[in-house]
Image (cartoon, rainbow, N blue to C red):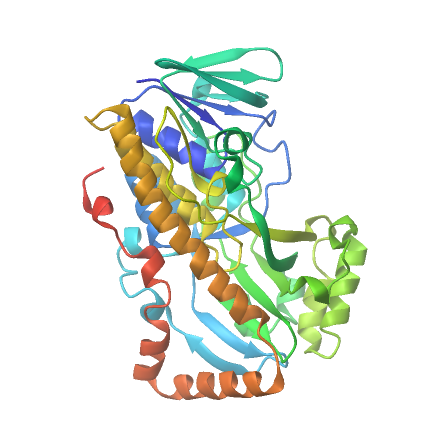
Amino acid sequence: MNVLVIGGGIGGLCLAQGLRKAGVPVTVYERDTHPAGRWEGYRIHIDPAGARSLRACLPDDLWRTFLATAGPGGDFGFLTEQLAELVVVEETISHPNGTDPEESHYAVDRRALRRVLLAGLGDTVHFGAEFERYEVDGDVVTAHFADGTTATGDVLVGADGIGSRVRRQYLPHAEPVSAGVVGLANKLLLTEDTLAWLPPRLRHGMNVVSDAGPFSLFTSAYQPAPGARAALAAITDDVPPVDQPYLLSALVAAPDALPPDITDYGPDELASVAEGLIADWHPALRRLIAESEHADRGANVFRVSPETEPWEPTRVTVLGDAIHAVPATGGLGGNAALRDARRLTQALAGNGSIFEEIAEYEVDMREHGYAAIREALTVRDQLLAHGTLRTFVARSWFRLCSRITPLRRKTFGDADNEVSQPRAWERQAG
């Protein structure tokens, strides 16, 4: 068995770590010329499904490094546009098994996670390798790259993201479509100056702020663990500034609430649009956008993959956003990719035929991947719901939940159960 992985993102690298751990030869081909070859994004949420997958695929020392570089997930608050607390859901309710590191949740800087996943892979990862197409000839699959080189293997895995060239050749009917939601993202460094005016509730955990309009503001604090930079330096010479706390905020809006060419806007124009939408909100909310990092402002028109009917397994398969692109609402996409990596590791290290193992992987991948999509779309609808009556009812219910713990537990305790609960294959060793 020799596995070719197209794409060196979180899912592809986790798969490479898992296969190496299982003794399966693997090579990763990444089009970027180096890990920081493009903007690397913000913090991401690792839920229990993602944590279990990392624990299974990473060697022990890298799992410990992951824990040492991750920040706490925190409680989840629902706030009015004037920052009145409606309800704050404790971690003990949202993640009742959080005392087990494999069943907890974390806020992780994407740059730090990628460095952990790259550690120890060495020549396994080839940067500057732009994939163009593949060919299958009998027992061999050949990848062709833009520079004219080729690579051959027994299995080719498309882990090349939402614009996957592997998927476009293999499953062209599975092309993602608009998810009907746009995110305007910002990053505010948590320094002495910003902490002096930032309300305490926004300094920790996650929050959703909303009024009666067709948009909501999501915030999440990244508070790195003490010694995060040193822990990362112990495994790599490429250490980004992961010890700087910051607040991620994303104004999530319906497309018709924004200019149609919003993705062409520059940082100042994006801030102006966001500030205009929340012009009558609490001054601290407007200020966190106005004082956000200029270079880290961005607009993303989210896309989502259609649920695709099963296909006949071959020596080509796909994982993560390449096949089940999940809108960022809910923070489930990265975890679904990590879960794919773990399940595909089991399949490719299994004792059955290649086609039988890949077929079983693809059944499980579709099941949990599409569950993540459905949950993300449900969250999208909640974030975009608007109207005076709807807002009154929702706020009344949140306030009631805040006062009655059993009601809060019943309402929020199983919020992500369908998505993150362990499947039968996750209870197997490895």
Considering only vertical position in the picture, is 305 above or below 207? above
Number of numbered discs: 0
Seen as rendered, the residue at the extreme top is 149
Identity of the residue drawn at 61% across and 24% down: 33
Q: Position of residue 253 (x, y in %)?
A: 65, 65
Q: Position of residue 340 (x, y in %)?
A: 37, 40
Q: Tell me where residue 188 sits by quadrant.
A: bottom right
Q: Nearer the viewer, residue 233 or 221?
A: 221
Considering only vertical position in the picture, is 373 above or below 393? above
Considering only vertical position in the picture, is 84 above or below 323? below
Q: Position of residue 94 (x, y in %)?
A: 35, 68
Q: Position of residue 197 (x, y in %)?
A: 66, 72
Left/right placement of residue 382 relative to residue 178 reads: left
Q: Nearer the viewer, residue 87 or 67?
A: 87
Quadrant including the C terminus: top left
Residue 363 in view: yes
Left/right placement of residue 193 relative to residue 75 reads: right
Residue 57 in view: no
Q: Tell me where residue 239 sits by quadrant.
A: top right
Considering only vertical position in the picture, is 427 above or below 140? below
Quadrant including the N terminus: top left
Identity of the residue drawn at 71% across and 68% down: 287
Identity of the residue drawn at 71% across and 73% down: 278
